[in-house]
Amino acid sequence: MSQATRSMPDTVLEARNVTKRYPGNVALDRVTFRVQRNQVNVLIGENGAGKSTLMKILSGVEKPDEGELFLDGQRIALDSPRAAASQGIAIVHQELLALTNLNVSENIFAGRELCRAALLVDKERQDARSDAALQRLRKPMNVRCETGRLPLGCRQIVEIARTLDQGSKILILDEPTSALSASETESLLHLIADLKRSGVTIVYISHRLHELLHIGDTFTVLRSGHIVGECARADVTRQWIVERMSGRTETSCANELVPAFANPTVLSVRGLSLVGSVGDEAAQAALHSLTFTLREGEILGIYGLLGSGRTELVEALAGLRPIASGEILLRGETIRIDSVRSAMKAGIVLMPEDRQRDGLFPDLSIRENMAMSSNRTFFLSRDEEARRVNRLVADLRIAVKDIELPITTLSGGNQQKVLLARCLLCSPAVLLMDEPTRGVDVNAKTDIYGILRGLTAKGLSIVFTSSEIEETRLLADRVLVLCQGRIRAEFQRDELTDEALFAAASPSIATSGANPPHLASGHPA
Amino acid sequence: MNSAAGSISQPSRAVTASARLVLLLLRARAVLVLVLLIVLFSALAPEFFTANNLSILTKHVAITALLAVGMTFVVLTGGIDLSVGSIAGLSGIAAGYLLTQGIAFGGVAHYPPVAIVVLLSICVCLVVGGLNGWLVTRAGVAPFIATLGTLYIARGTALLISNGKTFPDLGDTAGRGGTGFSAFGQRFVLHIPTPVWMMMAVFAIAWILAAKTPFGRHVYAIGGNERAARLAGIRVGQVTLLTYLFSSACAGLVGLIIASQLEAAHPATGESFELNAIAAVVLGGTSLMGGRGSITGSLIGAFVIGVLAVGMVMLGISEFWQMVIKGVVIVLAVAVDQLQARLQSRLLPFLAQSDQGAGR
């Protein structure tokens, strides 16, 4: 298939025979990657396959050890992101780098401020140009609004507007949707189609197959530093991608179901309400009198868009947010939850959504991270702790070389498993999981689903939230759909369809999350 | 990590071993510097490495070491305690007041025994430490500001109690029942001065707390990631409060030792001691951002500062140069700390890989 694409005239950017080594690891091994002009070039691969390294090389963040870069057939050297930007190549990183304390137009011009008399920042001109860029993206917003107050979807738009204003011809999007809700994602995909029409070339990296199949024109699969597949959209199937990525055929996760209908109720929530608030750190969606139950050994999915209150619900149950009213019963007894500890004591443990921010202790070892919540004795015993940790390392199939190494040496999927192990060491009755597989590759996802099934077979009950339809469908026995703080629908596993789920989650009035009308106050140009 | 990476380039055992060695040397650099300084001063000044001088030196170091070890927990949580010098001053004044004025009770002054005086003085310090902890955990004041405030509050209180004067003659004075307060900081037990015993005891307690108890683990966790600590069920406020209490108790001990050694309590005692303590903590490799560091490091850091000071005096280096050199050493220590962090992240993949081959 490489014969077909070789030296075609519409290759705008090419990395030829690029090799990049890190200590003890060859991230890219003589990789040749061609970016087709005016197309959405999709790059897929599991964590650690070398995608990010390749993108860093294309955007000037890293220099290759060997190999060359060609732009429009001309050899170029990219020494810095600035050099790449001047060649019209821009990248929007996976972790948005927006400066949250600055406003929208200050972000768009950060590091390249327009000046008057070579000294004073020309705010009017910056605002006007920012406004123009946002208009071009058809996402007008108040350019004087502080970025920290914007939802993630809008911050992403701001970053794209920045690249647009720089006159970028090639836009690299590194997992742009990993933090976005379904509606924000949809709006981003529309935007990408628009950009393509206006002549921008897109390089798109993502784990989410349905998105890729929706917008991709050409597909390239990386595995362990090698390109293992290149294909045009017409010839790509889901099966093909998953096989190339993992090197093994896709295994269905829809394994035999143990119906939990007959089991006794473990958790019942009656009339749970939360007061909503706005603000940067303390912002939360309101919850309006939620009532539901959870049976022993059941996996209950909470599906909802960003701002629907799904995170607030699990965090309230875990004792992180003050509950305004409502009753929570565990095994028929009313429990008071006013702190994380009280929830933990009752047997409810939360595994957070953002493991870097809320889960991991980067300075501590794998053992210390895992045993953090479960030490009850006055003196710690390292041997006893190591025994407990090693048992879970084996149970959860965590790929660990040495439990004394820092947690940061593990891949995302294994870090996630360490957090899961920490929760399990508290021997909970109810495990709450906020986005159980965020930023985890496909194989690790399947693995984690399998592990969770195994745990429920032993009597653990799980409540998880997700913004991925696929995950909800694969994992949940029963799904509650949250919308604007209310339970909008309930589906049993066998009556679940993607369309029904999505329809129930979408607010009935046209207030799509990515572009609320109140932000659309255009600044006078 | 990448499972295929091992097959692409299997690092040789030699590389792994040298990576381990480099990391070990960097981690033990405070000890290396200490040994280097001792060798250097012993070579330059023959009287430096004598039992008598080392005994004096250790007694000198005990003051800084007690403050530094006490403050290490605070720094590990990501905080700082600027008030320790003032607390030491306040503790001495409290003891001086109790010893010379007694407790007025029914119009008659009662002179409490030394043990009670010591306990009451430490309790006064714990009040200040509790105030620090309350300000940081409940009132949400940044540790730097909170302890800067209590630095002034404690110093002012000491001056108010003594009316700016010194409480003299705290030694064994008849009429007050021959108190024996001077023995507190001056006696020798098994040929070792009492301050050194106290330093060793506090060090042992702190080391056990840090390495062997959930409290220590929680301190590291809070400094590493406070949000995650809260979510892991750690009582963040309570643990943080305890670190400030521990720091203030150690500072109180220092104030008592100094008052006992001088047999007088001066309200200005301990001015700028906090800077020496912070320097010792930082020299010992504890990160001011929290989460990284050790109790042993702070002890060694205190010795480095003490040896440097005494050694330079013996060599007759001018006092002005002494300050410059001390500053250079502190800045270099932090620069090397940054180097270690960077090198460690570079070398860790080697260690992670090597165990793959070893098949743990």
Image (tube, rainbow, N blue to C red):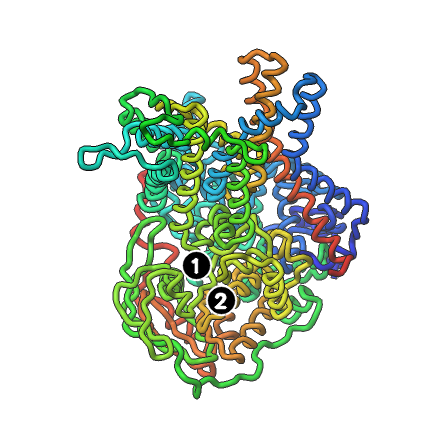
Please indicate whether residue A204 sits to the left or right of residue B176 in the image. right
Q: Report whether residue A72 is seen.
A: no
- Image quarter where the N terminus of chain A lies is bottom right
The image quadrant that residue B115 belongs to is top left
Based on the displayed image, in which of its 4 quarters is residue A122 positioned?
top left
What number is the disc on residue B348? none
Return the residue nearer the eye: B90 or A516. B90
Task: Kindly identify the residue that appears in the image at 42 percent across and 73 percent down.
Answer: A501
Q: Is residue B44 left or right of residue A254?
A: right
Q: Of the residues shown, which amino acid type is indicated by label 1? A: Gly
Q: List the residue tagged with mark 2.
A: A426
The one nearer the camera, A142 or A304, is A304
Q: Residue at x 26, y 63 (%)?
A: A324
Q: Secondary structure at mark 1?
A: loop
Instruction: Find disc 1 in the rendering and name its residue.
Output: B233
Residue for point 60% across, 13% down? B317
Marks counted in the figure total 2
The x and y percentages for residue B327 are 55, 22
Q: Chain of mark 2?
A: A
For the residue carrying disc 1, how many other residues have a C-alpha within 10 Å: few (<14), some (14-19), or many (20+)? many
Q: Are marks 2 and 1 in contact (CB under 8 Å)?
A: yes
